[in-house]
Amino acid sequence: MLDLRTVAQNLPQVAERLSHRGPGIDLTPVGELANARRQLIQETEAARAQQKSESAQLGRLIKSDPPAAEKLRATLKGLSERVKAGDQELERLEGELTQLLLGIPNLPHGSVPVGGSAADNRLVRYGSAPKPQFAFAPLEHFELGEKLGILDFERGAKVSGARFTFSSGAGAKLERALISFMLDLHTSRGYRELLPPFLVSPDAMTGTGQLPKFAQDVFRTVALDEKGELKRELFLIPTAEVPVTNYHRQEILDGARLPLSYAAYSPCFRAEAGSYGKDTRGLIRQHQFQKVELVKFAAPETSYDELEKLTADACEVLERLKLHYRVMLLCTGDLGASSAKTYDLEVWLPGQDAYREISSCSNFEDYQARRAQIRYRPAPGEKPRLVHTLNGSGLAVGRTVVAILENYQEADGSVRIPEALQPYMGGMARIEP
């Protein structure tokens, strides 16, 4: 969430920066409420100061001038009612302001290119592995997976509906191998492994920005009491970013320990799996999938250095799997609502003849930390400050399976296992029909 003081004091500049994200972000209600709040604070504080000043005279007047004391009591009662009403109105105004601010996206960083869509994203670099060359027409992953008997979309739909899949045999083993490979790689590079809860509270979802703006995109669960009334509400996590970022919610961290880096495996659940009619077959857009997530907590002065490191760590997975990919800097119009700057890693899929996103690495600056009240103390005795939070997929497991199937396929329908994964597959070098 944006800082109210920054927005109120720099309304035209903030509105200009937000306009780069696209139309429809109106800060007028925030400005009006902020002005009303400022005026109310001034009026209430003036009444409070008068109340304090005149209260000091009451004891003296009771003895020296009883009629004047009675008159002063009436004045003090009126002041007390004004202060109480002012405090109540201030609480109401601040509640409205908070709700408005929760729905406003983050300010794009100055290095983010201005643009209206993914077409305006900027190419940063390619990975070291070249595009694979085929002497045959490469198949898409769902064709390969069904022929190999390792992906069962029909039974997934029978059990859970559209956009759910069974992985079986070598397919299930491949996903498990990728999770272990990614976690081993990231922990070797300084990340602390966490296994987080997969159900979280509404407060946790609000802390990372999923609520209230994207309530329609998540799965909500409820527990009912014996009367059938709501007892508890929890949400299935859309990514491990939610529980891991909230790991330090309402804490003050030791600045000397920053940055803190975490790696976490989790299943992910998304009610909105993408545009209707798009990627209806296969693993690209599923309601349930698996990911290894990277999360960092950094001091503001170093957070953009940490973004580069986090992005490099996600890239390292693709480098070791020898998959061709590119790194794209997202433009303002393609930026996620909570992010100030994002790099997308796009892996090459020869069956689709296209690059597809496999990781997004973002710096949220203090946008999430303000919501979740995550602060750090730069040095002993200094005032706490908000941390910067960062996260990125390291990687999305299902999409990595897609990339392996399409890039390592052979003319006979078999799929080679990348050398880096073979130890995690019990020495298996190939998946055969």
Image (cartoon, rainbow, N blue to C red):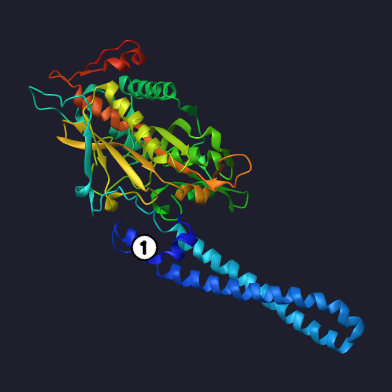
Relative to residue 430, is residue 143 depicted above or below?
below
84 sits to left or right of 36: right
Q: Which residue is mark 1?
A: 13
Q: Nearer the viewer, residue 285 or 311?
A: 311
Q: Is residue 35 left or right of residue 181?
A: right
Most extreme residue toward the top is 427
**Residue 79, image x and y in percent?**
71, 79
The answer, for residue 59, to whether it is visible in the render is yes
Res 71 quadrant in image: bottom right
Residue 108: percent from left, percent from top: 34, 52
Horizontally, residue 20 falls left or right of residue 269, namely left
- Residue at 20% across, 24% down: 129
Residue displayed at 38% across by 40% down: 304
Q: Name the element at disc 1.
A: helix
Whether residue 236 is visible to the viewer of this picture, yes or no, is no
Give coordinates of residue 425: x percent, y percent.
34, 15
Q: Is residue 264 above or below residue 246?
A: above
Q: Depth check: 233 or 296 in front? A: 296
User: Which part of the image, by quadrant, shows the C terminus?
Assistant: top left
Could you tell me residue 237's position as x and y percent? Answer: 45, 41
Q: Residue furthest right?
A: 63
